[in-house]
Image (cartoon, rainbow, N blue to C red):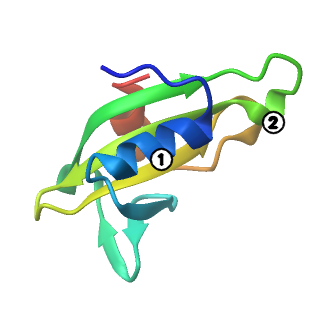
Amino acid sequence: MYNYDTVTEAINGLKARGFTMDLNLKENCIVCNEEKFNPDDFEIVEFYRFEGNTDPSDEAVVYAIESNNGMKGVLVNGYGISAEEMSDEMVKKLRIHK
């Protein structure tokens, strides 16, 4: 696994390694453009956790994700007070890798 000092460095490093799509988290799926991926439709290949030393809003997890259809992308999600609302199924999927 690679080591990154910042969220931006992790995103750029993953994109350089082929994780080029920007993913967004919805309550029960991740979305890439108009395509939705349920928890069974993707795997987390790598993840990097960043903790804000002085600001809790800087806390984030960067996920490298590959879907069953071969799409590779990056999902950035806050945790703690910055966390998005998610279904139980999505929480379980992302928690496996935290």
**Residue 88 seen in this snapshot:** no
Q: Are marks 2 and 1 in contact (CB under 8 Å)?
A: no
**Residue 58 seen in this snapshot:** yes
The label nearer to you, 2 versus 1, is: 1
The part of the image, by quadrant, that contains residue 97 is top left
Q: Where residue 89 sits in the image (x, y, percent)?
A: 36, 44
According to the picture, the residue beneath numbered tag 1 turns out to be: 12
Q: Quadrant of the C terminus?
A: top left
Q: Where residue 18 sits in the image (x, y, percent)?
A: 26, 53
Within 10 Å of disc 1 (Cα), the crowding (few <14, some 14-19, many 20+) is some
Residue at 49 percent across and 45 percent down: it is 11
Is residue 36 rendered to the left or right of residue 57?
A: left
Question: Is 87 in front, or is 8?
Answer: 8
Residue at 51 percent across and 58 percent down: it is 27
5, above or below 13, in the image: above
**Amino acid type of the residue tagged 1 in the rendering:** Asn
Q: Quadrant of the N terminus?
A: top left
Residue at 60 percent across and 42 percent down: it is 8
Farthest bottom residue in view: 34
Classify mark 1: helix, strand or loop: helix
**Amino acid type of the residue tagged 2 in the rendering:** Ser
The part of the image, by quadrant, that contains residue 7 is top right
Any mark on residue 43, and which?
none
Residue at 87 percent across and 27 percent down: it is 55
Q: Where residue 37 sits in the image (x, y, percent)?
A: 29, 64
Classify mark 2: helix, strand or loop: helix
73, above or below 77, in the image: below
Within 10 Å of disc 2 (Cα), the crowding (few <14, some 14-19, many 20+) is some
Is residue 8 rendered to the left or right of residue 44?
A: right
Any mark on residue 57, and which?
2
